[in-house]
Image (tube, coloured by chain):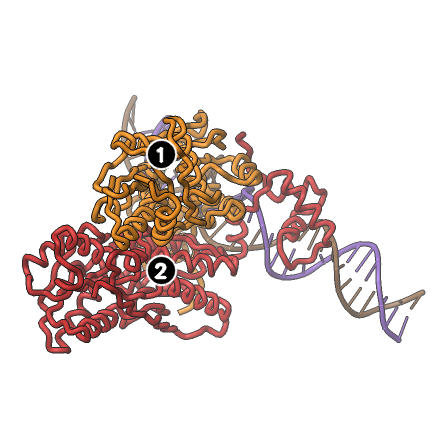
Chain colours: A orange, B red, C brown, D purple
Amino acid sequence: MQHSAKTMKDVALAARVSVMTVSRAFKQDSSVSEATRARIRIIAEDLGYVFDATAANLRTQKTNFVAVTVPSINNAHFADTVGALSDSLAQAGMEVLLGHSGYDVAQEEVLVEQLLRRRPEAIVVTGGRHTERTRKMLLNAGIPVVETWDLPDDPIEHVVGFSNAATMAGMVDYLVAKGMARIAFIGGDTDSDTRGADRRRGFVAAMQARGLDASRLIGAGKPPISMREGASALGQLLNDFPDAQAVICVSDLVAFGALTECQRRGVRVPQDIAIAGFGAYEIAGISHPTITTINPHPRLIGTQTAELILQVLDTASGRIGPQRLEINWDLQGAESA
Amino acid sequence: MQHSAKTMKDVALAARVSVMTVSRAFKQDSSVSEATRARIRIIAEDLGYVFDATAANLRTQKTNFVAVTVPSINNAHFADTVGALSDSLAQAGMEVLLGHSGYDVAQEEVLVEQLLRRRPEAIVVTGGRHTERTRKMLLNAGIPVVETWDLPDDPIEHVVGFSNAATMAGMVDYLVAKGMARIAFIGGDTDSDTRGADRRRGFVAAMQARGLDASRLIGAGKPPISMREGASALGQLLNDFPDAQAVICVSDLVAFGALTECQRRGVRVPQDIAIAGFGAYEIAGISHPTITTINPHPRLIGTQTAELILQVLDTASGRIGPQRLEINWDLQGAESA
DNA sequence: ACCATCAGTGTTATCGGTAACCAAAACATA
DNA sequence: TATGTTTTGGTTACCGATAACACTGATGGT
C-alpha cells in the first residue's frame, strides 16, 4: 500500500511526452492539443498521480492560501465569517489556512508567524489589538492585511468590521425608548475578549451620554464566555443590583443563560427584568421568550473580506490604498425587552 | 511597503556566512556555534526575514500538515473535535489544514483531492461514507487515513469513533426504563446527514428489538439541522402522533427547538411529552428544563485521533496495522425525560 | 610530534514543478 | 509552391530551502 508518490515525470514517461507537456495538460489555458491533454489526464488518473502543489507554489511564488486567525474555531460567529470567507475565496480558487489564537495576543503572535511561513497571498486577522511584533510582521509581510470584527483607530492596513461600542449605544437607545433607565451590563470585564470589552465601554459611554447610571456592571470571566456564565452572572446581578430594570449581555449565549436563570427563579422576563444580548445567534430567535439582540452579520463580514482581498490582489500593480469597510448592524427587537 | 520577501541568502549575506549556516541556525539540533546562531537569529529578525516553509517542504518532503475534512465548520461538535485535534498536533509541531464539504460526498471528493495536493502527512475525514473515487484517492495517498465520528463496517484504514446507532439503543432503553413505550424520533430523514441517518436507523432497530412501534418518525430536512427545524418538527409530531409519550431528537439543537415549541403551546415537558437529544451541547445542561442527551465526547475524538496519527507517523518503518478506536459515550439524564 | 576525532562551516546537487525561450509541424495565404 | 503564422511540444534554468558530503582548525590521547 505504501506507494512512493508519483510525479509528473512518471506521467510523462507513461504518456511518452515531456514533463512540460504534462504540466501544460494540468493548466487551464496553456497550449496542448485537447487530444494529448485528455490522454495525459487519463494516464495520470490511472497512475494515481496527485499534483504536487508544494513544488508549484515554490516555482510560481503563489500558494493560493489566504491565512486567517480567529480567537476560537468553536464560536458560531467566527465560524460563520470563516465559512463565508472560505466559500467566496473558493470561487476564485483560493483556500483558507486557518489558525486559532485562544483569545491571547501572545499566542496570536506565534500563530501569525507560523502562518506567514506558509507564504499566504493575504492574511485576515480577527480584531484590532495585537502585539507590537505582530504588527511589525504583518506590515513587513508584503501581502494584503485585513483586520475584521472591529474598527481599530490605527489599522494595520485594511479593515472590514463595525464598531462594537456603537452597537451598545443603539441598544441603550432602544431600551431607553422602552422606558427603562436602570440598565445593567454583563460581561466584557476582561481584556482577553477585546470585542466584549469594547461593548462594555460602549455601554458605559452611552449611558453616561444620556445622564444615566453606568455602574451596574457584572463580570463574566475569561472567554470563551457562554451560557453558564450568563446564568451565574444573573444571580449576581439580582443580588448586587436588585433594582435593575434591564440587562444587556455581552452575547446571546450569556443572555440565554441569564434567561434560564430567571426562569429557574421565577423572575419574569421582560416584566421583572428585560434581557438583551448580542450576536443574533439562532437561539435568540427561538428561545421562549425570544431575545432582543444585535445582528452584526458575521457572514457578510466574511464575504466582504473575500471580495476586498480578491480586488486588492487583482490590482496588484496599481496598489489600492487601505480600505475601511464598515458593516451595518441591525437591532432585532424581541419578546425579552 | 511592498518589500520583496527576504530569503536565507539575504540573511547569509548580511551575516557574512553561507546560506547553509543560516539554515542550520534555524534548526534545533544542528551544529552551529551558539554564538553564530544567536547572531544570525538577530540579523534575520532585523531584516524581517520569514522562513519559507514552501521551499523547505519541497526539499524535505515533509509539510507538517494534517488535512482534515468536516461537513461544516459551523458545528460545535466538529469544531470541538478539530480544536482538540489541532491543539494536540500543535504540540508536535504539526498544523491542521481544514476543509469543509457541506455535507456532500461529491464536494468531499473535490476537497480531498485539493487537500492531498498539499501533501499532508496524514488525513482525517469525518464520517465513513465517501464516493468510490474518494476512497481510492485516500487508499493510494500513501499516508495514514483516519475516519472519525463513526465506526464504518468497511473502513479505509484507521477509525476513531463510536456507533451512532448504539447511542440510540441506549437512549431507548433509558426511556423505556422510565416507563415510556410510544417513542417518536425527529430527524435523520436525509442521507446527507450520515450520522443522523445512522441514529434514526439505530432508533428503529432498538424499538423493534424491544417489540415497540418504531413508526413514529418525523423528518427535519437537510443539514445543517438546527433549532428552527426542531420547533416545526415538534408541531408536526403533535399533529401526526398525538399519543407520543417521548421524542428523541437527532441533536440537542433540534431538541431545544422542540422544547421551545412545547413552551409556546403550553405542552408540559416531561409530563406531557419527554424530550431527548444528542450531543451534550451546552444548551442541554442549561435550558429550563435541562435536556436528556448523549455525550459523544467530541474533544476526546480529536485528541485520540491526534495521538493515533502521531503514533503511526512515529512508527513509519514498522507500519502499524489499521487501528479501530471506539470512543465511549455517556447518557446524561436530565429534567426533560 | 603525530594522527584521530570532532565541532563548525562551506559546496554541490536536488526536491517537483513552471517561466521563458526555442524548434518543428500544421495550417493559411498569396 | 513559397512564405508567413499559429499550434504544439521540447529544453534549460530556476524557485528557496536542505541532505550529503567535504573541508578546516582545534582538541586530545599516546
Where B38 falls versus B196 (above or below)?
Answer: above
Q: Which quarter of the figure has residue B153? A: bottom left
Q: Nearer the viewer, residue B169 or A24?
A: B169
Chain letter for mark 2 = A
Quarter placement of the N terminus of chain B: top right
**In whole angstroms, how far apart are the C-alphas of marks 2 and 1?**
56 Å
Q: Classify residue A308 as left or right of residue B198.
A: right
Q: Residues within 10 Å of mark 1 (few under 14, many from 20)?
A: many
Q: Nearer the viewer, residue A37 or B80?
A: B80
Q: Nearer the viewer, residue C12 or A74?
A: A74
Residue type at tag 2? Gly
Mark number displayed over residue A37: none
Residue carrying label 2:
A48
Q: Which quarter of the figure has residue B77? A: bottom left
Residue carrying label 1:
A168
Residue B55: percent from left, percent from top = 53, 49
Residue A123: percent from left, percent from top = 45, 40
Secondary structure beneath label 2: loop
Chain letter for mark 1 = A
Label whose residue precedes the other's in the sequence (2 or 1)? 2
Extreme residue in the bottom direction: B210
Where A1 falls versus B91 (above or below)?
Answer: below
- Mark 2 or 1, which is nearer the eye? 1
What residue appears at the point 47 percent right and 61 percent down from the top-left corner?
B88
Secondary structure beneath label 1: helix
Extreme residue in the front direction: A243
Quarter placement of the C terminus of chain B: bottom left
**Can the viewer see residue A131?**
yes
Residue type at tag 1? Met
**Can the viewer see residue A124?**
no
What residue appears at the point 12 percent right and 75 percent down from the top-left corner?
B208
